[in-house]
Amino acid sequence: MRHPPDAVYAEVRDTDPDVLDADGLTAHVGRLAVLRAWLDAEQVRSTRAQRRLAEQGRAADPASSLARDSKQSSKEAKAAAEREEVCSAMPGFEDALTAGEVSAGHVDAVAAAVRNLDEAEAAEFAAEAESLLGDAARQGVDAFAKNCRDMAKSIRARHNSRADVDELEAQRAQSKISRWVDKQTGMHKTLIECDPVTDRMFWSAIQGTRSQLRRRNQQTGAKGSWDRLTVDALVEAVSRTGGGRARTGMVVHIDLATLTGGRHDTTLCETDSGMPLPVDTVRRMACDADIIPVVLNGDGVVLDEGRAKRLATFEQRIAIEAMQATCSHPDCTVTIDDCRIHHLTPWRLGGCTDLADLAPVCEPHHHLIHEGGWTFTMTPDRVATWTRPDGQHYWTGTLNDRTPIAA
C-alpha cells in the first residue's frame, strides 16, 4: 500500500472534532492512529532508502538526516532509525504498521528489547516474529513492551545463565547522581540513575516515610500535593539517623518453585513495581532477608480490618502488591508505590478496610472517581468495572496483572 487508506484520509480531513460526541471522537482517534501508523511506515521506507545511500557514500546516515531534515530530536531520530532495523528484520511488522494494525510504539518496544542482545540471541528473538505480531495486534504498547522484555530476558538466560546478573552488575557500575539548576525556573534538579535493586531500597524508605507523613497530615489537617509530600518524605528519610531511621527493604514477587529451584518455564521474579530481577540475585538475597509469605485469603496474615482501621495496613498493601503492579485504571501505568489504596465503598459511607474493598489508584484517577463522576467497582475475585459519568460502560477486566511469563 503506497498511499494512506483513501477512506481514512478523507474522513480525517473532513471531520471536525469539536462537534463530535464521545463515540464519534473514539472513531476519529482510531482513524488518526491508522493514518499516523501509515506515516510511520513511510518513514521506515524513507530511512531504509537513506541508509542505502549512506552506505554508498551518497548521503548522511539516517539518524543525522532525520534529526536535521525532519526537525526531530536526536532521541526521536535514533528511535526512527532503530524502527527501520526492526522492520527489516521482521517484515511483518512493517506490513502491519502500514495497515494500521500496530503502532510505531509496538515496533519501538521490539527495538528496545533486542538492543542488548547479541547476534544469535537477536536471531532467536526474530524467529518469534509471527507470535509477537499477534500479541502486538491484541495488546497495548505497555503490555506488549513487557512481553518483549520478558522474552528477551528468557532468551538471554538460555544463552547465558549469568546474563541477568551481569546486566545488574553493569547497571550498578553505571549508577550516578547528577545535580543542576534550571536557569529558566530556578528549580534545583537531582537525577538519580541506579540499578533496580538500589532503586527499590531507595523508594522503600521514601514510601514508608511518606505514609507516616500522610497520616500525620491527616491528623493535623495540613494540606499539600502528593508531589510535595513525596519531596518532604525524601528529605525526612535521608535526614534520620540512629533509632529514627525509617524501615527500609525491598518487596520481591517470586514464585516458590523459582525461589527453591531456580528459573523454570513460568518463572515470576520482579519487584513490586513490576521490574524483572535476576533470579540468582534474589535467591542470594533471600539467604539473609526477612521473607514475608503472602497467601491470599489465607490465615497467616490478618488482611481484613473491617472498621477497626481507617487506612490499609502494611500487610494489606503487601497482599495487594502481590496481585497488582500498577494503578487499577486500565490505561494507567503508574506503579503501585505511587498509588493511594482506595476504598471502593467510601469509609464515610460505612466502607470497611478489607482486602476485597481495597484497590490501588493513582492520584489523577483517584480524583476522576471522587470529583470526575466516574464509577469504579470490583467483585470479590478482583474483576473491576470502570463506568463513565454518562453511564456508559468503559472497561471490565481482572486487576491481577502479575501473570508469570513463559520462558
Image (cartoon, rainbow, N blue to C red):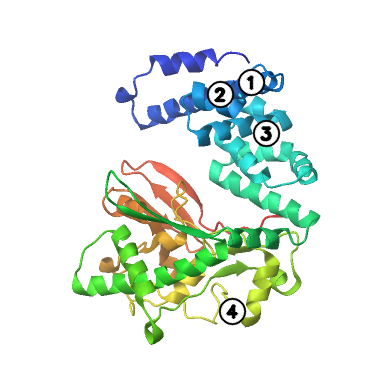
Q: Are marks 4 and 1 in contact (CB under 8 Å)?
A: no
Choose mark 4 or mark 1, whichever is in front.
1
- The quarter in which the N terminus is drawn is top right
The answer to whether 319 is drawn above or below residue 20 in the figure is below
Query: Residue 77: image x %, image y %?
Result: 54, 31
Q: Residues within 10 Å of mark 1 (few under 14, many from 20)?
A: many
* Amino acid type indicated by mark 4: Ile
| Residue at the spot of label 3 | 86
Q: Is residue 21 left or right of residue 407?
A: left
Type of residue at label 2?
Ser
**x, y percentage for residue 124?**
78, 43
Say what amino acid the circle numbered 3 marks: Val
Q: Would residue 37 be visible to someone looking at this image?
A: no
Using the numbered discs, state the Cα–Cα distance from disc 2 to disc 1 in whole angstroms: 8 Å
Q: Secondary structure at mark 3?
A: helix
User: In the image shown, does 202 or 356 lie closer to the viewer?
Assistant: 202
Single out the mark in the foreground, 3 or 1: 1
Q: Which residue is mark 4?
A: 291
State the mark number for residue 50: 1
2 and 1 marks in contact (CB < 8 Å): yes
Q: Is 306 on the left or on the right of 150, as rendered?
A: left
Nearest-to-viewer mark from 3 and 4: 3
Q: In the picture shown, does residue 179 fall above or below 24?
A: below
